[in-house]
Image: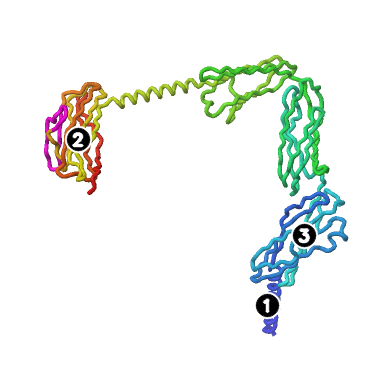
Amino acid sequence: MMRNLARFNFVFFLSLFTLFFLFSSSVFAFSVEHSEVTNKVAPGETAAYLLEIHNDLSKLDNFVIESDPFAALPFSDIIESIVIDDTSVQVGPNSTVKIPVFVRMLSSVVPGKTYRTSLIVRSEALSVEQEEPLVVTVVSPKDLISVETTLPERVIPGKGLTFDVKLRNTINTILDSATVIISSELFEEQRTVKIFPYQELTIPIKFDVLSSTSPGIYALDVVVFESNTLRGQSSQEFEIVKNPNIHESLEQLDGFLQDRFVVTKTNNGNYIVEERFSLPVSSLSKPFTRASVPPTEKREDSWVWVFELAPGESFNLVAVKDYRSLFVLFLVLVFAGVILYYFATRKVTISKSIFTVKEDDQGVSNLKVMLHVKNRSKRVEHVKIMDILPELVTPSKEFGTLSPDNIQRGVHGIRLTWELATLEPGEERVVSYMVHSKMRIIGKLTLPNAIVQFRKAHKLYTVYSNRVTYYSKAKG
């Protein structure tokens, strides 16, 4: 009997597990959700959604989407119509589709409330359906545009007043031609603007409050119309305070690489006021700017002084931008550069050049070599000019004004040496000689550096010339 009871319990729990598995498979075989494109609308406008269906099966499934038939006209006094872009869609395995859905509200619907409707999504493969609720918030047309201002509560007459009117579109609808009217007892201004969905738009307003304006409380009204319909409004009060009668004087004196600013502010009114002065100061000019009164704030592009003036009190400021120190530094650098150049060029130099004397179609046979020595420094002594000829060429007996004091023949060439007792400052010597080749030169011939050695202040110095390369016109 115990064995039969155990077998019964096993079969019972196995059946329950199978039913639970089948139920779970059917329930979680697809999922439905949505995102709001526009769910905040005015009466008579259309809310928009994107319905998302995800097929969790490993096979293709067809889904049917339906709305509540009694949720719209003629059975509803809230919703005019519910439009589903595609009421039957095929979704591949483990895939998702998005279907646009539009819910148009009746013009007579009461604003300031939230309304609900729902969609039914049915899987034909599983014969299972899910309900997806949609929420629509209906706002008053006059609340579609949020209006705020930065108008200060207290306004001093006799000065330009600047503030911003900030508009924010609270719905996903473009207002192509919205008329904004800003008005008070003191002024009125009208603008036409285009506002995109959820855009925050700032309108700067500036007007002059006459110094003769009577003190008291005034109202500022901002209204926004679109298609002759009120879309937003705001009203606030501000106070015109007593005239402090601030006298301000700014004098700018320009000199050589120097700008001087003299600022004077005097309170001719009858109560304490807070004033400010801003001086443009670039990053480059900051190190060269000085002021008689330390600034309250050093900004990136300006210095700002904020101060209070009692009746009859004056604020005096002298600010100077002085670039003369920079100019002096520039002159010092130029002078140092000239000095360095002067000393860098005060030296002994040697240059080497080569000329063709005889050349025919068979190649070059005779060349002339010239060495040019210059002394740009002080007097030098024990001067030796040395030049080396490669084994390919030999010097002839034709020399210029100076003949070599020594000719040494080695394994790899010939060295010619000229000796001079001294070279005076500014003195130049030119040494030239003829060479001929043992065979005609075809192509390129390179002669090594010449050398000049000398003593100055009991030190031995060696200077090298340039190398010279000759290219024969003959063709091999």
Q: Which residue is mark 3?
A: 133
Camera-side mark, 2 or 1: 2
Dot 2 crowding, Cα within 10 Å, few <14, some 14–19, many 20+: some
Q: Secondary structure at mark 1?
A: helix
C-alpha span from label 1 to label 3: 37 Å
What segment carries the magenta color?
Answer: 398-419
Q: Which residue is mark 1?
A: 14
Residue flagged by tag 3: what amino acid is it?
Answer: Pro
Q: Which sits in the foreground, 239 or 17?
A: 239
Q: Which sits in the foreground, 246 or 64?
A: 64
Camera-side mark, 1 or 3: 3
Q: Quadrant of residue 374?
A: top left
Residue in the image at 71% along x and 38% along y: 202
Q: Which sits in the foreground, 342 or 433?
A: 433
How many discs appear? 3
Q: Which residue is mark 2?
A: 368
x and y, in percent, of residue 92 in the image: 65, 68
Q: Is residue 127 above or below residue 82?
A: below
Camera-side mark, 2 or 3: 2
- Mark 1 touches mark 3? (CB < 8 Å): no
